[in-house]
Amino acid sequence: MSILAWIIVTSLFGGMLSVLFAAALTLNTRASWVQMLVSYAIGALLGAAFLNALPEALELSKNPGQMTATVLFGILLFFILEKLVLWRHCHAAECEAHDRLPGAAIVAIPSRDQHDHGRSGMMIMLGDTFHNFVDGILIAAAFMADVQLGIVTSIAIIAHEIPQEAGDFLILLNSGYTRRQALLFNLFSSAATLLGGLSTYFMLQDMNHFIPSLLGLAAASMIYVAMSDLIPGLHKRPEIGATVQQVALITLGISSIWLAGSLFTHPA
């Protein structure tokens, strides 16, 4: 299968799978499932960043100092972008942008009198459409560097998108959208992943020297999401049993990325 075909298939399949799975979890209000997925997603993101994206970026760049500086810049950049999103959403003491973080438990669908007439839902969709577009850029850059790297990067991105999409689904319901509308809006937003992937593929055909930097930003994105957005939610359950489960699932996420990388490095 060609690189372009890989990008199209993973972008479409990953986006649709994460949205449909998230909608199923949300409608069934299974908080424990989402929390388990968050722990697994942390391991998948960290595994993809440190075992695949960063080593590949360092190998391609031939300049370790420049690449680690790129990762550091990326972490700062994503911090600033997230601050801008939170600043735009938070106008009161109770902020839905914080409440939607993937680490938060799934709650019951709010009553009609709690709706905000679509304001927060639309802002969430605009922000996530941009986020999905960036995911498409990172997926395409990874596949253009190496097919195995593209596969494990896609796995990690899909793993963290599922709990995030579940939170988005609840925000849309809270804003007054029907379940059907919330599903359609999320599916539409996920299409930005394919747009980002295709744009990057055609733009980088004659600019391969940008691929190492994009891989460094991909690693920064995965590290930042895992450490800033996901791990804090796990600290809300400090009991021993929950901690053991979290560590086991994080380890499983790392192991699955390592296994996927090993399998696709030496195809049959």
Image (cartoon, rainbow, N blue to C red):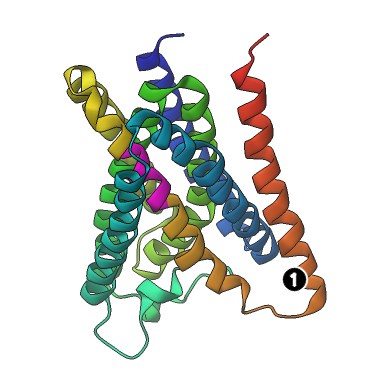
| Residue 24 percent across, percent down from the top left | 58, 50
The residue segment tinted magenta is 214-221
Nearer the observer, 82 or 89:
82
Q: Quadrant of residue 82?
A: bottom left
Q: Which residue is mark 1?
A: 243
Query: In the figure, 259 relative to 183: above or below?
Result: above
Q: Residue furthest right?
A: 241
| Residue 18 percent across, percent down from the top left | 51, 43
52 displayed left or right of 40: left
* 48 in the magenta segment: no
| Residue 224 percent across, percent down from the top left | 42, 59
Q: Counting other residues with Cα less than 10 Å from the Cα at mark 1, is it few (<14), some (14-19), or many (20 or more)?
A: some
Nearer the observer, 174 or 10:
10
* 220 in the magenta segment: yes
The residue that appears at 41% across and 9% down in the rendered structure is 2
Specify the amino acid type for callout 1.
Thr
Magenta stretch: helix, strand or loop mostly = helix
Quadrant that contains the C terminus: top right
Nearer the observer, 71 or 243:
71
The residue that appears at 67% across and 55% down in the rendered structure is 250
Nearer the observer, 158 or 17:
158
195 displayed left or right of 222: left
| Residue 176 percent across, percent down from the top left | 35, 67
